[in-house]
Amino acid sequence: TNLEPKFKYFQERFGWNDSELGDIIQKQPNLISFNIDDSIRPFDDTKLGKIIQQFPSVIGYSIEDNIGPKIEYFQHRLGLNEYKLRSMIQKQPCILAYSLEYNIDPKLEYLRKRLGINDEKLRTIVGRYPSLLTMSIEDSIEPKSLYLQERLNFNETQVGKIISKAPSIFCLNIDNSLEKNIHWLEQRLDLTNEEVSKLIWKLPQLLTYSIDGKMKPNLEWLEQRLELTNTQLSKIIKARPNILYLSIEANMKPTLSWLQERLLLETTDELAGVIEKMPTLFGCSIGANLEPTLDFYIDVLGVDIAIPLVKHNTSILAYSLENRLKPRLEAAKKAGLVIDRKCVMRMAIYTSEKWSRSLVKKIDS
């Protein structure tokens, strides 16, 4: 009964139910003797409650000897502001149990010196995946680095750049995840080791995606929807590997429907041809990009000229309307150019320098 007021205090302050409180006391029986207000000060009660649930031992740590020096280290060594520091500790509160000298600093130095990851990238990596600081260099980090070098012919700097883009790679098992994904890509898309290496370099997250949960269903849907051969499918994925994680319902299906309807594509073969020419269309927003850009070409040339033009030159749908097409149209009009099919193509595909020269030639003539 003497403990009842303390139990009630913890439950009301941190929102714990009886079961949660019981689990925490089992892990940290001395909970009732600690002054929580002398523990981790940067956190509000809700967040502190969650941290204690994950890592009850933290409330017994000394501010002066343990928590304070580590917070100061992360702020000065990595330049973490208070918000990012709080977020990191919430994700991985047990890092407060690791030695700065023997655990945390050697790992950061390995990533910086061996893999060439600069402090700015380290700050991002640690902020997103603080669990990296809990891994052993000898048993986890270095073996995975060596695996990527040997399996995909990357050097240490290239591995560092890959990890900067997809730090969770170091959290994965070599045989059950990394090798499994690489082997599947090789077999499913009939790729050489060099081609897989280029694919991973372009999108390192491919090593982290679920085969059965994402990549396999996406490939099968696209293959069936466009009646693609494996060669065609492989070509498309090599050009746009993020197709392997796009949403079928929210992205691929509506994009293909829009292209078929607006470009008057009568057959699946025509639709497949458009995607083969420009797989990056899957990354364009219909409402913000494709629709207004197509309308621009129709307004300038008329539907009978614009639709065939875009159908056979789908890349012109990707150019910026506000930063490229509209300003160039105004410049062409001022220069007295005839706004026809050829002029519109020049407006779309010419570099800035080449476009400027074409305007000067017209003015001079």
Image (spheres, helix red, strand yellow):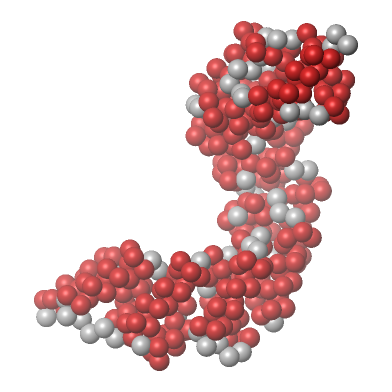
Return the residue nearer the eye: 114 or 252: 252
Image quarter where the C terminus lies is bottom left
Return the residue nearer the eye: 208 or 264: 264
- State the image coordinates of residue 95 (x, y, percent, origin top left): 69, 24
The residue located at (65%, 63%) in the rendering is 247
The number of numbered badges drawn on the structure is: 0
- State the image coordinates of residue 102 (x, y, percent, origin top left): 68, 18
- State the image coordinates of residue 283 (x, y, percent, origin top left): 54, 65
Residue 9 in view of the camera: yes
- State the image coordinates of residue 93 (x, y, percent, origin top left): 69, 26
The residue located at (55%, 84%) in the rendering is 261
Return the residue nearer the eye: 251 or 9: 9
Return the residue nearer the eye: 178 or 219: 219
Which residue appears farthest toward the left when viewing the image?
364
Residue 155 in view of the camera: no
In the figure, residue 203 lies in which quadrant?
Answer: bottom right
Residue 97, placed above or below residue 354: above
The residue located at (67%, 9%) in the rendering is 62
**Left or right: 180, with 299 as reference point:** right
**Left or right: 240, with 320 as reference point:** right
In the figure, residue 344 lies in which quadrant?
Answer: bottom left
Image quarter where the N terminus lies is top right
The residue located at (77%, 28%) in the rendering is 16
Residue 301, placed above or below residue 9: below
